[in-house]
Image: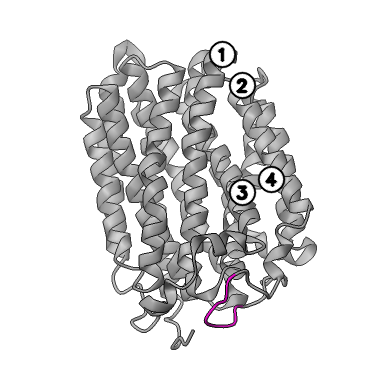
Protein backbone atom coordinates (compact mmCIF):
# COMPACT_ATOMS: atom_id res chain seq x y z
CA UNK A 1 0.00 0.00 0.00
CA UNK A 2 1.37 3.44 -0.76
CA UNK A 3 2.67 5.14 2.34
CA UNK A 4 4.31 8.50 2.61
CA UNK A 5 7.40 8.93 4.77
CA UNK A 6 6.79 7.80 8.32
CA UNK A 7 6.89 10.27 11.20
CA UNK A 8 10.07 10.65 13.22
CA UNK A 9 11.10 8.43 16.05
CA UNK A 10 9.24 10.53 18.63
CA UNK A 11 5.88 8.89 17.85
CA UNK A 12 7.06 5.49 19.09
CA UNK A 13 8.52 6.91 22.31
CA UNK A 14 5.30 8.78 23.05
CA UNK A 15 3.26 5.67 22.30
CA UNK A 16 5.42 3.65 24.71
CA UNK A 17 4.89 6.30 27.41
CA UNK A 18 1.13 6.37 26.86
CA UNK A 19 0.95 2.56 26.88
CA UNK A 20 3.00 2.44 30.08
CA UNK A 21 0.44 4.62 31.91
CA UNK A 22 -2.59 2.86 30.39
CA UNK A 23 -1.19 -0.58 31.16
CA UNK A 24 -0.03 0.60 34.57
CA UNK A 25 -3.59 1.57 35.40
CA UNK A 26 -4.90 -1.83 34.28
CA UNK A 27 -2.11 -3.75 36.06
CA UNK A 28 -2.84 -1.82 39.23
CA UNK A 29 -6.58 -2.34 38.90
CA UNK A 30 -6.55 -6.08 38.18
CA UNK A 31 -5.17 -7.21 41.57
CA UNK A 32 -7.18 -4.43 43.23
CA UNK A 33 -10.35 -5.92 41.70
CA UNK A 34 -9.38 -9.34 43.07
CA UNK A 35 -8.80 -7.94 46.55
CA UNK A 36 -12.02 -5.92 46.41
CA UNK A 37 -13.91 -9.02 45.34
CA UNK A 38 -12.41 -10.93 48.28
CA UNK A 39 -13.53 -8.14 50.61
CA UNK A 40 -17.06 -8.50 49.19
CA UNK A 41 -17.09 -12.22 49.99
CA UNK A 42 -15.94 -13.74 46.68
CA UNK A 43 -14.49 -17.24 46.61
CA UNK A 44 -12.04 -18.69 44.05
CA UNK A 45 -14.79 -19.43 41.53
CA UNK A 46 -16.20 -15.92 41.75
CA UNK A 47 -12.71 -14.48 41.21
CA UNK A 48 -12.46 -16.59 38.05
CA UNK A 49 -15.79 -15.29 36.75
CA UNK A 50 -14.93 -11.64 37.45
CA UNK A 51 -11.54 -12.07 35.78
CA UNK A 52 -13.27 -13.60 32.76
CA UNK A 53 -15.81 -10.76 32.44
CA UNK A 54 -12.86 -8.39 31.92
CA UNK A 55 -12.38 -10.11 28.55
CA UNK A 56 -16.03 -10.73 27.63
CA UNK A 57 -16.93 -7.44 25.90
CA UNK A 58 -13.61 -7.29 24.01
CA UNK A 59 -14.28 -10.81 22.72
CA UNK A 60 -17.15 -9.46 20.59
CA UNK A 61 -15.74 -6.02 19.79
CA UNK A 62 -12.24 -6.85 18.53
CA UNK A 63 -12.94 -7.80 14.91
CA UNK A 64 -15.33 -4.87 14.16
CA UNK A 65 -12.75 -2.47 15.60
CA UNK A 66 -10.02 -4.08 13.51
CA UNK A 67 -12.12 -3.78 10.35
CA UNK A 68 -12.71 -0.12 11.09
CA UNK A 69 -9.00 0.50 11.62
CA UNK A 70 -8.04 -1.26 8.37
CA UNK A 71 -9.78 1.44 6.33
CA UNK A 72 -9.39 4.40 8.67
CA UNK A 73 -7.20 5.97 11.29
CA UNK A 74 -5.70 4.25 14.32
CA UNK A 75 -5.22 7.20 16.67
CA UNK A 76 -8.90 7.87 17.62
CA UNK A 77 -9.10 4.51 19.39
CA UNK A 78 -6.38 5.52 21.85
CA UNK A 79 -8.18 8.27 23.84
CA UNK A 80 -11.44 6.29 23.69
CA UNK A 81 -9.62 3.39 25.29
CA UNK A 82 -8.13 5.59 28.00
CA UNK A 83 -11.55 7.02 28.92
CA UNK A 84 -13.07 3.55 29.19
CA UNK A 85 -10.16 2.24 31.26
CA UNK A 86 -10.36 5.21 33.64
CA UNK A 87 -14.14 5.00 33.89
CA UNK A 88 -14.10 1.27 34.59
CA UNK A 89 -11.48 1.69 37.31
CA UNK A 90 -13.22 4.61 39.00
CA UNK A 91 -16.68 3.05 38.94
CA UNK A 92 -15.28 -0.32 40.03
CA UNK A 93 -13.85 1.42 43.08
CA UNK A 94 -17.37 2.43 44.08
CA UNK A 95 -18.99 -0.95 43.36
CA UNK A 96 -20.54 -2.61 46.41
CA UNK A 97 -21.62 -5.89 44.82
CA UNK A 98 -19.87 -8.60 42.84
CA UNK A 99 -22.07 -8.21 39.70
CA UNK A 100 -21.38 -4.45 39.59
CA UNK A 101 -17.66 -5.03 40.10
CA UNK A 102 -17.67 -7.57 37.25
CA UNK A 103 -19.52 -5.15 34.95
CA UNK A 104 -17.08 -2.29 35.50
CA UNK A 105 -14.20 -4.73 35.07
CA UNK A 106 -15.68 -5.54 31.66
CA UNK A 107 -15.74 -1.84 30.72
CA UNK A 108 -12.09 -1.57 31.74
CA UNK A 109 -11.31 -4.56 29.51
CA UNK A 110 -13.11 -2.99 26.56
CA UNK A 111 -11.07 0.20 27.01
CA UNK A 112 -7.85 -1.77 27.11
CA UNK A 113 -8.85 -3.52 23.88
CA UNK A 114 -9.57 -0.21 22.11
CA UNK A 115 -6.20 1.19 23.14
CA UNK A 116 -4.26 -1.92 22.16
CA UNK A 117 -5.89 -2.36 18.73
CA UNK A 118 -5.22 1.29 17.89
CA UNK A 119 -1.66 1.17 19.19
CA UNK A 120 -0.66 -2.14 17.59
CA UNK A 121 -2.12 -1.08 14.24
CA UNK A 122 -0.19 2.18 14.49
CA UNK A 123 3.09 0.32 15.04
CA UNK A 124 2.39 -2.06 12.16
CA UNK A 125 1.46 0.78 9.82
CA UNK A 126 4.24 3.22 10.70
CA UNK A 127 7.08 0.66 10.78
CA UNK A 128 8.83 -0.88 7.80
CA UNK A 129 8.95 -4.71 7.70
CA UNK A 130 12.58 -4.65 8.82
CA UNK A 131 11.64 -2.54 11.86
CA UNK A 132 8.61 -4.51 13.04
CA UNK A 133 10.27 -7.01 15.40
CA UNK A 134 12.24 -4.20 17.03
CA UNK A 135 9.38 -1.68 17.18
CA UNK A 136 6.86 -4.20 18.51
CA UNK A 137 9.44 -5.18 21.12
CA UNK A 138 9.93 -1.55 22.14
CA UNK A 139 6.17 -0.97 22.10
CA UNK A 140 5.56 -3.85 24.50
CA UNK A 141 8.16 -2.40 26.87
CA UNK A 142 5.44 0.13 27.65
CA UNK A 143 3.16 -2.71 28.73
CA UNK A 144 5.93 -4.22 30.84
CA UNK A 145 6.67 -0.91 32.53
CA UNK A 146 3.00 -0.64 33.46
CA UNK A 147 3.01 -4.23 34.70
CA UNK A 148 6.11 -3.42 36.74
CA UNK A 149 4.78 -0.33 38.50
CA UNK A 150 1.07 -1.19 38.73
CA UNK A 151 1.24 -4.19 41.08
CA UNK A 152 3.76 -2.44 43.35
CA UNK A 153 1.44 0.55 43.65
CA UNK A 154 -1.57 -1.71 44.27
CA UNK A 155 0.30 -3.69 46.93
CA UNK A 156 1.41 -0.47 48.62
CA UNK A 157 -2.11 0.95 48.74
CA UNK A 158 -4.02 -2.20 49.69
CA UNK A 159 -3.98 -3.29 53.30
CA UNK A 160 -5.87 -6.19 54.88
CA UNK A 161 -5.23 -5.09 58.46
CA UNK A 162 -8.23 -4.43 60.69
CA UNK A 163 -10.67 -5.20 57.89
CA UNK A 164 -9.46 -2.28 55.76
CA UNK A 165 -9.27 -4.20 52.47
CA UNK A 166 -12.65 -2.97 51.18
CA UNK A 167 -11.62 0.66 51.62
CA UNK A 168 -8.01 0.36 50.46
CA UNK A 169 -8.88 -1.68 47.36
CA UNK A 170 -11.39 1.02 46.39
CA UNK A 171 -8.69 3.68 46.81
CA UNK A 172 -6.35 1.64 44.60
CA UNK A 173 -8.99 1.53 41.84
CA UNK A 174 -9.55 5.29 42.02
CA UNK A 175 -5.80 5.90 41.79
CA UNK A 176 -5.72 3.56 38.77
CA UNK A 177 -8.25 5.82 37.03
CA UNK A 178 -6.01 8.84 37.61
CA UNK A 179 -2.97 6.96 36.27
CA UNK A 180 -4.88 6.08 33.09
CA UNK A 181 -5.75 9.74 32.52
CA UNK A 182 -2.05 10.69 32.45
CA UNK A 183 -1.57 8.70 29.22
CA UNK A 184 -3.71 11.25 27.35
CA UNK A 185 -0.84 13.74 27.56
CA UNK A 186 1.31 11.67 25.15
CA UNK A 187 -1.24 11.07 22.39
CA UNK A 188 -1.19 14.34 20.48
CA UNK A 189 -0.48 14.03 16.72
CA UNK A 190 0.85 10.52 17.16
CA UNK A 191 -0.40 9.29 13.78
CA UNK A 192 1.06 10.52 10.51
CA UNK A 193 -1.65 12.22 8.50
CA UNK A 194 -0.97 10.13 5.39
CA UNK A 195 -0.32 6.78 7.06
CA UNK A 196 -3.76 5.26 6.52
CA UNK A 197 -4.89 1.79 5.62
CA UNK A 198 -6.41 0.48 2.38
CA UNK A 199 -9.67 1.96 1.20
CA UNK A 200 -12.95 0.72 2.62
CA UNK A 201 -13.76 -1.51 -0.37
CA UNK A 202 -10.36 -3.23 -0.42
CA UNK A 203 -10.38 -3.83 3.32
CA UNK A 204 -13.66 -5.75 3.07
CA UNK A 205 -12.40 -8.13 0.34
CA UNK A 206 -10.47 -10.26 2.84
CA UNK A 207 -12.87 -12.46 4.85
CA UNK A 208 -12.08 -13.50 8.40
CA UNK A 209 -11.94 -17.15 7.36
CA UNK A 210 -9.32 -16.34 4.74
CA UNK A 211 -7.17 -14.55 7.30
CA UNK A 212 -7.41 -17.47 9.72
CA UNK A 213 -6.43 -19.93 6.98
CA UNK A 214 -3.28 -18.00 6.17
CA UNK A 215 -0.35 -20.09 7.29
CA UNK A 216 1.34 -18.51 10.30
CA UNK A 217 -1.69 -16.61 11.60
CA UNK A 218 -3.19 -19.45 13.71
CA UNK A 219 0.19 -20.19 15.30
CA UNK A 220 0.72 -16.54 16.19
CA UNK A 221 -2.78 -16.32 17.67
CA UNK A 222 -2.40 -19.45 19.80
CA UNK A 223 1.05 -18.53 21.12
CA UNK A 224 -0.22 -15.07 22.03
CA UNK A 225 -3.27 -16.60 23.75
CA UNK A 226 -1.10 -18.95 25.81
CA UNK A 227 1.36 -16.26 26.89
CA UNK A 228 -1.31 -13.70 27.77
CA UNK A 229 -3.37 -16.29 29.67
CA UNK A 230 -0.29 -17.07 31.76
CA UNK A 231 0.34 -13.39 32.50
CA UNK A 232 -3.34 -12.74 33.22
CA UNK A 233 -3.88 -15.62 35.63
CA UNK A 234 -0.60 -14.87 37.38
CA UNK A 235 -1.88 -11.34 38.00
CA UNK A 236 -5.34 -12.46 39.13
CA UNK A 237 -4.47 -15.59 41.13
CA UNK A 238 -1.16 -14.79 42.76
CA UNK A 239 -3.00 -12.57 45.28
CA UNK A 240 -5.25 -15.55 46.11
CA UNK A 241 -2.24 -17.85 46.47
CA UNK A 242 -0.53 -15.22 48.60
CA UNK A 243 -3.58 -14.92 50.83
CA UNK A 244 -3.60 -18.67 51.45
CA UNK A 245 0.16 -18.90 52.01
CA UNK A 246 0.33 -15.88 54.29
CA UNK A 247 2.18 -13.63 51.81
CA UNK A 248 1.35 -9.95 52.36
CA UNK A 249 -0.25 -7.96 49.51
CA UNK A 250 2.81 -5.69 49.31
CA UNK A 251 5.04 -8.74 48.80
CA UNK A 252 2.69 -10.15 46.17
CA UNK A 253 2.88 -6.80 44.37
CA UNK A 254 6.67 -6.94 44.43
CA UNK A 255 6.64 -10.50 43.05
CA UNK A 256 4.36 -9.50 40.16
CA UNK A 257 6.54 -6.49 39.46
CA UNK A 258 9.66 -8.66 39.47
CA UNK A 259 8.04 -10.75 36.75
CA UNK A 260 7.35 -7.58 34.75
CA UNK A 261 10.92 -6.29 35.24
CA UNK A 262 12.28 -9.55 33.83
CA UNK A 263 9.97 -9.14 30.83
CA UNK A 264 11.39 -5.67 30.20
CA UNK A 265 14.91 -7.09 30.37
CA UNK A 266 13.96 -9.74 27.82
CA UNK A 267 12.61 -7.17 25.36
CA UNK A 268 15.70 -5.01 25.67
CA UNK A 269 17.86 -7.91 24.46
CA UNK A 270 15.38 -9.41 22.00
CA UNK A 271 17.15 -8.21 18.86
CA UNK A 272 20.44 -10.06 19.55
CA UNK A 273 18.50 -13.16 20.64
CA UNK A 274 16.61 -13.13 17.33
CA UNK A 275 19.87 -12.85 15.41
CA UNK A 276 21.30 -15.84 17.27
CA UNK A 277 18.44 -18.36 17.15
CA UNK A 278 15.61 -17.04 14.94
CA UNK A 279 12.01 -16.22 15.70
CA UNK A 280 10.51 -19.73 15.61
CA UNK A 281 13.17 -21.32 17.82
CA UNK A 282 13.08 -18.44 20.30
CA UNK A 283 9.29 -18.65 20.63
CA UNK A 284 9.33 -22.43 21.07
CA UNK A 285 12.11 -22.59 23.66
CA UNK A 286 10.74 -19.76 25.80
CA UNK A 287 7.19 -21.19 25.72
CA UNK A 288 8.49 -24.61 26.79
CA UNK A 289 10.56 -23.24 29.65
CA UNK A 290 7.73 -20.88 30.64
CA UNK A 291 5.34 -23.82 30.83
CA UNK A 292 7.60 -25.69 33.22
CA UNK A 293 8.06 -22.62 35.39
CA UNK A 294 4.30 -21.93 35.49
CA UNK A 295 3.75 -25.43 36.83
CA UNK A 296 6.47 -24.78 39.44
CA UNK A 297 4.39 -21.92 40.90
CA UNK A 298 1.97 -24.60 42.12
CA UNK A 299 4.67 -25.98 44.43
CA UNK A 300 4.81 -24.74 48.06
CA UNK A 301 7.97 -22.72 47.45
CA UNK A 302 9.46 -20.22 49.92
CA UNK A 303 9.12 -16.59 48.89
CA UNK A 304 12.72 -16.29 47.67
CA UNK A 305 12.36 -19.36 45.43
CA UNK A 306 9.03 -18.10 44.14
CA UNK A 307 10.76 -14.82 43.26
CA UNK A 308 13.42 -16.67 41.24
CA UNK A 309 10.77 -18.70 39.40
CA UNK A 310 8.74 -15.59 38.57
CA UNK A 311 11.83 -13.70 37.37
CA UNK A 312 12.84 -16.42 34.90
CA UNK A 313 9.20 -16.93 33.91
CA UNK A 314 8.83 -13.21 33.23
CA UNK A 315 11.88 -13.31 30.94
CA UNK A 316 10.39 -16.23 28.99
CA UNK A 317 6.94 -14.62 28.71
CA UNK A 318 8.52 -11.43 27.33
CA UNK A 319 9.15 -13.07 23.97
CA UNK A 320 5.66 -14.23 23.04
CA UNK A 321 3.68 -11.01 22.67
CA UNK A 322 5.89 -8.88 20.38
CA UNK A 323 6.99 -11.77 18.15
CA UNK A 324 3.45 -13.09 17.78
CA UNK A 325 2.43 -9.58 16.64
CA UNK A 326 5.10 -9.60 13.94
CA UNK A 327 4.20 -13.16 12.95
CA UNK A 328 0.53 -12.25 12.46
CA UNK A 329 1.20 -8.91 10.73
CA UNK A 330 3.67 -10.32 8.23
CA UNK A 331 1.60 -13.43 7.51
CA UNK A 332 -1.71 -11.61 7.02
CA UNK A 333 -2.88 -10.02 3.75
CA UNK A 334 -1.81 -6.39 3.54
CA UNK A 335 -5.41 -5.15 3.32
CA UNK A 336 -6.38 -6.83 6.58
CA UNK A 337 -3.47 -6.46 8.96
CA UNK A 338 -5.45 -4.57 11.60
CA UNK A 339 -8.19 -7.19 11.34
CA UNK A 340 -5.56 -9.92 11.76
CA UNK A 341 -4.22 -8.15 14.85
CA UNK A 342 -7.80 -7.87 16.09
CA UNK A 343 -8.26 -11.61 15.56
CA UNK A 344 -5.09 -12.15 17.57
CA UNK A 345 -6.60 -9.99 20.32
CA UNK A 346 -9.87 -11.93 20.02
CA UNK A 347 -7.87 -15.08 20.67
CA UNK A 348 -6.27 -13.35 23.64
CA UNK A 349 -9.63 -12.35 25.04
CA UNK A 350 -11.08 -15.79 24.40
CA UNK A 351 -8.22 -17.12 26.49
CA UNK A 352 -8.91 -14.46 29.12
CA UNK A 353 -12.53 -15.64 29.32
CA UNK A 354 -11.94 -19.38 29.14
CA UNK A 355 -8.70 -19.61 31.14
CA UNK A 356 -9.92 -17.78 34.28
CA UNK A 357 -13.24 -19.62 34.18
CA UNK A 358 -11.39 -22.92 33.88
CA UNK A 359 -8.93 -21.77 36.52
CA UNK A 360 -11.78 -20.89 38.87
CA UNK A 361 -13.36 -24.30 38.38
CA UNK A 362 -10.04 -26.11 38.82
CA UNK A 363 -9.16 -24.00 41.85
CA UNK A 364 -12.51 -24.79 43.44
CA UNK A 365 -11.94 -28.50 42.92
CA UNK A 366 -8.19 -28.91 43.36
CA UNK A 367 -6.96 -25.75 45.10
CA UNK A 368 -5.62 -22.40 43.98
CA UNK A 369 -2.26 -23.81 42.83
CA UNK A 370 -3.86 -26.07 40.19
CA UNK A 371 -4.53 -23.33 37.59
CA UNK A 372 -0.78 -22.81 37.25
CA UNK A 373 -0.39 -26.43 36.16
CA UNK A 374 -3.07 -25.79 33.54
CA UNK A 375 -1.13 -22.76 32.30
CA UNK A 376 2.03 -24.83 32.10
CA UNK A 377 0.29 -27.34 29.84
CA UNK A 378 -1.02 -24.50 27.63
CA UNK A 379 2.46 -23.03 27.17
CA UNK A 380 3.97 -26.43 26.43
CA UNK A 381 1.31 -26.90 23.71
CA UNK A 382 2.28 -23.49 22.27
CA UNK A 383 5.92 -24.57 22.22
CA UNK A 384 4.94 -27.73 20.35
CA UNK A 385 3.07 -25.67 17.76
CA UNK A 386 6.17 -23.57 17.17
CA UNK A 387 8.37 -26.64 16.84
CA UNK A 388 6.01 -28.07 14.22
CA UNK A 389 6.74 -25.07 12.04
CA UNK A 390 3.60 -23.02 12.54
CA UNK A 391 5.58 -19.84 13.12
CA UNK A 392 7.77 -20.41 10.09
CA UNK A 393 4.58 -20.43 8.07
CA UNK A 394 4.63 -16.65 8.32
CA UNK A 395 7.38 -16.72 5.72
CA UNK A 396 5.14 -18.28 3.10
CA UNK A 397 4.65 -15.61 0.45
CA UNK A 398 1.43 -17.14 -0.89
CA UNK A 399 -1.62 -15.86 1.04
CA UNK A 400 -4.70 -17.97 1.57
CA UNK A 401 -6.72 -14.96 0.41
CA UNK A 402 -5.62 -12.58 -2.34
CA UNK A 403 -4.17 -9.37 -1.00
CA UNK A 404 -4.27 -6.07 -2.86
CA UNK A 405 -0.53 -5.62 -2.47
CA UNK A 406 2.53 -7.81 -1.99
CA UNK A 407 3.19 -8.42 1.64
CA UNK A 408 6.67 -8.70 3.16
CA UNK A 409 8.30 -12.01 3.93
CA UNK A 410 8.46 -12.82 7.63
CA UNK A 411 10.99 -15.61 7.55
CA UNK A 412 13.96 -13.30 8.04
CA UNK A 413 14.52 -12.15 11.55
CA UNK A 414 14.91 -8.43 11.40
CA UNK A 415 16.78 -6.43 13.94
Q: Which mark is residue 222?
A: 3
- Dot placed on the residue nearer the N-terminal end, 1 or 3: 3
Query: In what element is the residue under mark 4?
Result: helix
- Which label's residue is closer to the chain start, 3 or 2? 3
Residues at circles 4 and 2 in contact by the CB criterion of under 8 Å: no
Badge 1 vs badge 3, beta-carbon distance below 8 Å: no
Left or right: 309 in relation to 117: right
| Residue for point 79% across, 64% down | 276
The verdict on residue 406 being magenta is yes
Q: Which mark is residue 365?
A: 1
Check contact, mark 3 vs mark 4: CB within 8 A.
yes
Q: Could you classify mark 2 by the number of other residues whose Cα lies within 10 Å: few (under 14), some (14-19), or many (20 or more)?
A: many
- Residue matched to label 2: 370
Mark 2 against mark 1, which lies toward the viewer? 1
* Chief SS of the magenta region: loop
Q: Which mark is residue 382?
A: 4
- Residue 339 inside the magenta-drawn segment: no
Residue 231 percent across, percent down from the top left: 54, 40
The span picked out in magenta is 401-407
What numbered label is drawn on residue 313? none
Amino acid sequence: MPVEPRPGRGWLLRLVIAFAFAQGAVSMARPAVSYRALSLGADERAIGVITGVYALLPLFAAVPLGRRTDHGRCAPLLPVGVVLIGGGCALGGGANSLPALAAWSGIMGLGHLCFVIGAQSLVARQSSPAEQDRNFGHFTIGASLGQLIGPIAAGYLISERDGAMARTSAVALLVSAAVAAVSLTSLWRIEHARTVGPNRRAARKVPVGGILRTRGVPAGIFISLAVLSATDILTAYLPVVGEQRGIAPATVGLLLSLRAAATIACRLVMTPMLRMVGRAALLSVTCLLGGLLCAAVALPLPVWALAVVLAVLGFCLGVGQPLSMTTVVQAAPAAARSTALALRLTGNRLGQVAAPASAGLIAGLAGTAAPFVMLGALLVAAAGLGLRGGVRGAADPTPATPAPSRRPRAGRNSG
